[in-house]
Amino acid sequence: MTLRQHTVHSVSPEQIREAWRDLGRQLAEWRKAAALTQHQLAALTWHSRSSIANIETGRQKATRQFWELADRELGADGVLFKAFGQVDDLTREYAEQTRAARHAQHDSDRPVNVVAVIVVALAVAPGQPRGENHERRPGRAEAAAGRRARVFR
């Protein structure tokens, strides 16, 4: 029997930041090739000029709709939209990797947490009897009503 090797591809936050910066640089190149200013592209994509500047530097992420529209307006023939899809896939992969790590951590902590929650719930659950000889203390509203009644007597 042979074992298949599985390679685990780990995505880092820095890789995602660099991918967004690369995508932004591509946008700037296509915009310049189309002889458009940031203001003109902003008007065509329903964004502000500062948003275009931030997207081009990778400081701001744009939606799938933005990339579809920018690709069409710049005549990129799907190049920008495809590049966005790759960055989006990378971002989703990182999110899944992070979620899996959190889930693994949560599973390893679960027995301790469940016991703690049960103990706390039994000790402080409101409205539950606290024992045979233990009277229920009045709540805030009842205590306030008692104080008002004493003042007017």
Image (cartoon, helix red, strand yellow):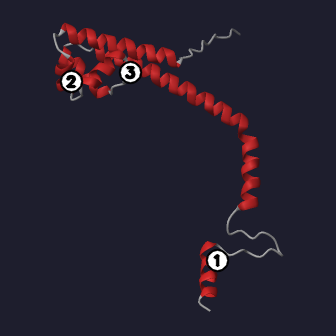
Q: What kind of residue is marked 3?
A: Arg
Locate residue 87, reporting x and y percent: 41, 18
Q: What kind of residue is marked 1?
A: Ala
Determine crowd level at label 1: few under 14, some 14-19, many 20+ residues with C-alpha closer than 10 A: few
Q: Residue at x 72, y 37 (%)?
A: 109
> Which residue is at the far right?
133
Locate residue 125, reporting x and y percent: 70, 62
**Which numbered tag is attached to residue 29?**
none
Q: What kind of residue is marked 2?
A: Ala
Determine crowd level at label 3: few under 14, some 14-19, many 20+ residues with C-alpha closer than 10 A: some
Ranked by sequence position, the earlier of labels 3 and 1 is 3
Instruction: Give the alpha-carbon distance from disc 3 to disc 2, as whole Å.
Output: 16 Å
What residue did someone put label 3 on? Answer: 59
Viewed as shown, does residue 51 lie left or right of 134? left
What residue did someone put label 2 on? Answer: 42
Viewed as shown, does residue 25 lie left or right of 43? right
Q: Residue at x 31, y 10 (%)?
A: 26
What residue did someone put label 1 on? Answer: 143
79 and 32: which is toward the camera: 32
